[in-house]
Every structure is written in C-alpha cells, then in structure tokens.
Image (cartoon, rainbow, N blue to C red):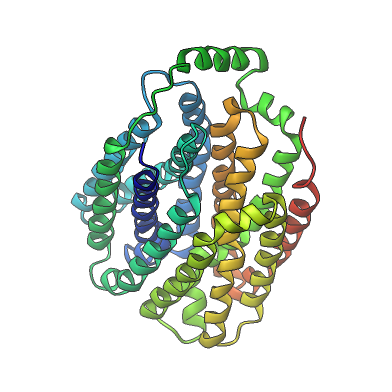
Amino acid sequence: MNSKKLTAQCAVLQGSYWVAVCAINGFATVFLLHIGLKSSQIGVVLALGNILGVILQPFVAAAADRAKRVTLQQMTAGMAIAIILLLILMQCMSKMVPGIVLSFLIVNMLLQVVQPLINSISLYYVNHGIYVDFGIGRGVGSASYAVAASFLGILIGRYYGLAIMAVGCLSFAVMFVTLISMPVVKDPNESKKEEQKNTANRQRGGGILEFACRYRNYMLVLLGMILIYVESTYVNNYLINIVVSLGGDIKRMGTLLTVSAMSELPTMLLFSRLVGKWDSRKLIRFAAVMFSVKALGYLVCGSISFLYVVQMLQMLSFALCLPSAVYYVNETMAVEDRVKGQSLLIASSTMGGVFGSLSGGVLVDFAGIKAMLATGLGLSMIGTAIVCIFVSRKDN
C-alpha cells in the first residue's frame, strides 16, 4: 500500500476540513451578527452547537470502535453529505432566521463529530503498520485555513451566507471524494483481532464512566484543556470585537486569521521530528504554558501590530498541543479505547467552546472586551497547571 499516497489523502482530508471550519466557525460571529443576533445570543447559539456535538461524539466514537460493516471512511463520508445538504438548506431559507440558526446549530454539531474521525483515519493506517505523517496532514490543514481566511474576510464581507455555503459545500465535497477513494486495510488476522477486541470491550466495559475510571489522569488532563480552550474560544469567537476595539475591520480580521494559521505550518510540518525527539507529554506541557503566555498577550495588547505578534504564538500553543495530544492518546490507550479517547480529546475542545461561548458573549455585552480577556487568562493559567501536573502520570 502506497504510504505517500495515503499521507497525501489524509492531508487532503485535513485541508478540506479546516477550510470548512474557517468558513463556518471562523466567521460565525460575523455572519450571525449580520442576520441580527446580539453577542450574547451568538454565544448561546455557538454553545448549543458545541453541546450537541459533545452529546453525539461518544455515541459516534463507540459506534466507530465497534463497527464491523461500516468503516471509519464510510461513516465520515456520510456526515460530509449531511453537512452539504444542511448548508444548501440554510442558504435556501433566505431571511428565515430561526431556520438558519437551527441549520447552523446542526452543522456546527457535525463539525465537532467529524474532527476526531478524521484524526482516527490517519491513525487507522499507522496502527496497521503503514506510515502516515500526521504532522504533514495537519500542516496542510493549517495552510488551507490560512489561505481560506485571507480571501474569506473579503467574500463574507460581501456575500455572507452565500460565501459560507459555497466554500463549505466545496470543502466537504472534496472530503467525500477523498474518503470513498481511500483503501480499507485487509488483515488476514482481522477476524481474530476483532473477536479479541470485542472480548476486551465486553470484559472491560465500553461506557464513558468505565473509560473515565480506567483513565483518571487523562480525564483530569482533559479538564485542564477545557479551561484552556475556554480562553481560546473567547478569542476565536470575539476576535472581530478585539480587532474593532483596536481600530481594525473584517478584512484585518481575515489577515490576522491567516497569520495565525500560517504560523502553525512550521510546527505541523516538523512535528514528526519533534515527537521523535521529545515525549508527547513534554510537548503537551510546553504547549499548555504557551497557551497562557498567549492569553496574557491578548490582555495587554494595545495595537493591531502587537496583535499580529500574539497571533504568531499559535505555532507554540495550539499547533503543538493538538498533534501531541493525538499521539498521546494513541500511545497510552488500549486499541479498543483509542477512538473514544480521540473523541473525548475533541470533546474537551468542544466543552471549552460551550463555556467560552456562553460566558464570553455575556462578558462582552455587560463588562467589555478587557474583562473577558482577563477572565480568560485566569482560566488558562488554572488549566495549564492542571495539565502540567497530570499529563505525566500514567494510568493503569
């Protein structure tokens, strides 16, 4: 099986996914403000989408771990089609705000569910002995996000919902075609391994509570990540408010998103070397500290120029944390728990998004941008401390 081709296909999956995320989530606040929602209402909408994603993720992960007839690729392809149909429906509703918001909620929910499946597809081949460079794939995702952000700032400023629908549909169409072209590994001992896996699932229990008992330290690491992601959500959701407070506009926001995404690229491309030289736990600890450094940068930022510098810290925080955590799960968990572990990893980001969306909108409306950023810094520092303490402790 061609390793380079599979790496390229996984890179296309990451690229198309992150272009869609840029269009749908990156400019969500701009779009929802355009259709008449307030900041606090937008926070509720984004939080509900994340909550629905958190609820659905464990069920999808459990199904993926146990599925016999449906492959990971087929399951993800089905969700890609569902998102395309919902985006088209959202555009057809024109000025029906409740319908648009409902469709947006479901799309946002499915976006949360798709991400761990895409990560697991790359690791599916790795676990079958086929080399796939996850860092390159995620680097392509960052570069794609950067390119998308650079022109979406202009397109969405003119076309709003139409631009989101068009870019989202195109991205998921590319993802669908790629998924159905990816091979399924035929292992002569697959049936025996499947029976062993099912036996392990029956003996150990497959529920979230049983999983949490087996991986207590991992669950505490996720708690720390949730707090860190609350601060990230504040910035991601209300970057337009930060930019405007410093004298910028939507185009400037698009440029800032491009700088942030492009800064991820070197880290992603070199990640295979980094994880070969340093343990994934050490990389996670360093990234957690840099999240708090970046949060401090947003709080003290007094100009657009300095904001560019803060955005570049993305290369040492999110860009390093995500792939390190993916490898951490794959290295420390039993085979039958890995998809669930990946799903909960993304769920921690989603839960951070829930709390960040709900509290961020209220803080912006009633206390202002600085109060939101100060709160985010405090939460990020607590989360960083929790991650640094528990990520090095091994679960039995």
Q: Within the image, what quadrant is residue 295 found in?
A: bottom right
The answer to whether residue 259 is above or below residue 165 is: below
The answer to whether residue 36 is above or below residue 17 is: below
* Residue at 40%, 65% in the rendered image: 143
Q: Within the image, what quadrant is residue 142 found in?
A: bottom left
> How far across and how far down the image is residue 158, in percent?
24, 72
For residue 57, side relative to residue 17 (left or right): right
Residue 283 in view: yes
Comparing 114 with 125, the one in front is: 125
For residue 192, side relative to residue 367 (left or right): left
Residue 27 in view: no
* Residue at 78%, 38% in the rendered image: 394
How many numbered marks are there?
0
> How far across and how far down the image is residue 373, in percent?
63, 70
The answer to whether residue 22 is above or below residue 69 is: below
> How far across and how far down the image is residue 276, in percent?
63, 53
For residue 341, side relative to residue 113 (left or right): right
* Residue at 22%, 53% in the rendered image: 91
Q: Quadrant of the C terminus?
A: top right
Residue extending farthest left: 92
> How far across and how far down the image is residue 304, in percent?
51, 85
Q: Quadrant of the N terminus?
A: top left
